[in-house]
Image (spheres, rainbow, N blue to C red):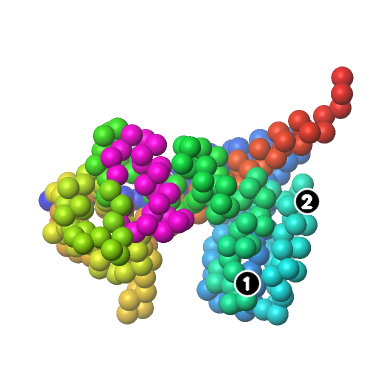
Amino acid sequence: MTATLIDGKAIAARMRDETRAEAARLTALGWAPKLVSISVGDVAAAELYVRNQQKSAEAAGVGFEARNYPESISLEQLQGVLAGLNADPRVNGIIIQRPLPAHIPVKALQKAVHPMKDVEGMHPSSIGNIVYNDLTLGPCTAVAAVEILKTLPLKMEGLDVCVIGHSEIVGKPIAFLMMGLGATVTVCHHMTRQVAVHSRAADAVFVAVGKPGLVRGEMLKPGAALIDIGINRVDGKTVGDADFASCKDVAGWITPVPGGVGPVTVSILMKNAVLATAMQMDHYRSAFAAAV
């Protein structure tokens, strides 16, 4: 058996076309979607992400402004910047680029972004809404991984799913998203004694740990779907958390790294930007409509 390669770029392109059409509709109504990126210090890695996000935004018809602040800026000053962006109706989404200097905790900034402008889905209320199956602005990577699985000819109801990794922004949200679709979910983490026992019983496996080669072919049920969310650098190459060579001979479907979850994640970010714009348009119309 050789796994079918899941083309994340093709999935992302379809989503981008839908987002661009909705962005054009909102622009015609006077609400052109706009994202503001916040980065701090001279961080080369963040600059690469910012450039890629700007290209994706332009392709989706979303405005993009990159702001970089000196490393000496204080948490209080940054919170003030975010307060201003929250109050600006011309700004519809805010992205906090990582890494940040040690004196600026990322969670404090994520909490400072208004939930209606939280296009990354990182605000505590955005994460918490998933428990209630409310995906208004969900965490981009988790939503992207689940959206990829939904493109496969698998019935979500009753599907046995194994999630390896239980981070607050990827693993746990995926588990709740899949439960919301009717799947039976097992979550494995660093204290799980026999991960392979759980992964071999699953129809679909998500892995997001940050450890290259963690999932091997013998850990999979033949024909299972493998969604690899890991991003690691090994010998100058970008690889996932799965040993692709052995897994592709067992899995039924597999995401490549790069080219799998990554492109879809960016498309979800742009989709969230447009959705946030529509939500804000409706909010302002409701709050400030002239009395009849």
Q: Is residue 64 visible?
A: no
At x 79%, y 33%, the residue is 287
Task: Give the Cα separation between the discs numbered 2 and 1.
Answer: 23 Å
Q: Is residue 280 left or right of residue 200?
A: right
Residue at horizontal 31%, vertical 69%? 211
Callout 2 amino acid: Asp
* Residue corresponding to mark 1: 104
Q: Is residue 221 left or right of residue 124?
A: left
Residue visible at 30% across and 65% down in the picture: 190
- Give neighbour class at mark 2: few <14, some 14-19, many 20+ (Cα, 10 Å): few
Residue 250 visible in the picture: yes
**In front: 145, or 267?**
145
Q: Nearer the viewer, residue 143 or 67?
A: 143
Q: Earlier in the sequence, mark 2 or mark 1?
A: 2
Image quadrant where residue 292 sits: top right
Which element is circle 2 on? loop
Q: Which residue has dot 2 on it?
A: 88
Q: Residues within 10 Å of mark 1 (few under 14, many from 20)?
A: some
Kind of residue sitting beneath label 1: Ile
Q: Quadrant of residue 168?
A: bottom left
Residue 117 at what x, y percent from top left?
65, 49
- Magenta span covers which residues? 163-185
> Where residue 148 appears, x then y in whole percent?
37, 45
Q: Secondary structure at mark 1?
A: loop
